[in-house]
Image: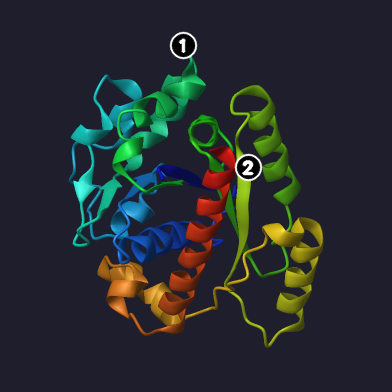
Amino acid sequence: MGEIIAIVNQKGGVGKTTTAVNLAASLAISRNRVLLIDLDPQANATAGFGINGKIITHTVYELFISDVGIKDLVIPTEMKTLYVLPSNERLIGAEVELVDMPSREFILKKKLEQVKDDFDFIFIDCPPSLGLLTVNALVAAKSVIIPIQCEYYALEGLGRIVGIINQIKNSFNSSLEIAGIALVMVDLRTNLTREVIREVKNYFQDKVFKTLIPRNIRLSEAPSFGKPAILYASFSKGARSYLNLAKEVKRNAEKSAGKRA
């Protein structure tokens, strides 16, 4: 399938990396070949699989500033079909260094050409900003998942994300589409959560995934053990919810692939 999906939200703390890590793991557990690219200098997706970004010497940073290929940088995980392209704080400098590079928006896209047929899904965990790293992800991706936290400021800035996606679509990547909106940190006991869900569905309609990701202590604990929820607490509500979301993502990807064929 070779589906390349960017997971984007310019706000921090909205479950973006949690979604990237657990979607990747949930698809890998079903024997899909998955690559997770950590484009965030905070390297939380890297740590989410027990990889210490502080001690590794080859990361996604080298992908942008040298001729090294993705195959030389990926790290296997304890899940046989899941690989991580790690990050660390050195990536902070990439935004500055990319400014003067030719075709700077297409660097990730060109590098992915080498491996896109080796994987069923490639997830790109973007930084909480809309700079050149995120632009590279959107140019390389076939689709975008936007996690939205069910809280008061959830919709703040959402219009800007959609605007950037449309700009990228018009300028660099005409096939880019929104794969779906993932509603995360859901607590249906509160009126505010139900109101946010209603507003998001009114705006995005059928682009909203049916699976709701609940607030769940196991999802919060899993990163500290260097594991996705499906390996840390497979029967928790959080893990089961991401398994269901992964099924939706796969179905939608197959439909989109059929339309493109």
| Residue on which the image places disc 2 | 177
Q: What amino acid is at disc 2?
A: Glu
* Res 51 → quadrant: bottom left
> Can residue 157 be seen here?
no
- Measured in 3D between alpha carbons, the distance from the residue under mark 1 to the one under mark 2, in whole angstroms, is 26 Å
| Residue 209 vertical placement versus 104 (above, below) | below
| Label 2 Cα neighbours within 10 Å, binned few <14 / some 14-19 / many ≥20 | some
Residue 68 in picture, x, y percent from top left: 24, 24
Q: Is residue 66 visible?
A: yes
Residue 239, label in figure: none
Image location of residue 14, percent across then percent down: 56, 61
Query: Which of pointers 1 and 2 indicates the residue nearer the eye?
Result: 2
Image coordinates of residue 216 in percent, x first then y, are: 48, 80
Q: Picture coordinates of residue 19 (x, y %)?
A: 47, 61
Quadrant of the rendering where the N terminus is positioned: top left
Q: For this rendering, which residue is in front, 60 or 201?
A: 201
The structure residue drawn at horizontal position 47% and vertical position 66%, both measured from the top left corner, is 247
Q: Are marks 1 and 2 in contact (CB under 8 Å)?
A: no
- Residue sitting farthest toward the bottom: 189
Q: Secondary structure at mark 1?
A: loop
Q: Nearer the viewer, residue 148 or 151?
A: 148
The residue under the point 29% across, 45% down is 86
Q: Is residue 59 left or right of residue 245?
A: left
Task: Residue at 36%, 48% (x, y): give it.
Answer: 120
Q: What residue did someone put label 1 on?
A: 102
Q: Earlier in the sequence, mark 1 or mark 2?
A: 1
Position of residue 184 in the picture relative to residue 232 (left or right) = right
Three-letter residue code for mark 1: Pro
Q: Residue at x 52, y 29 (%)?
A: 132
Does 197 sit above or below residue 189?
Answer: above
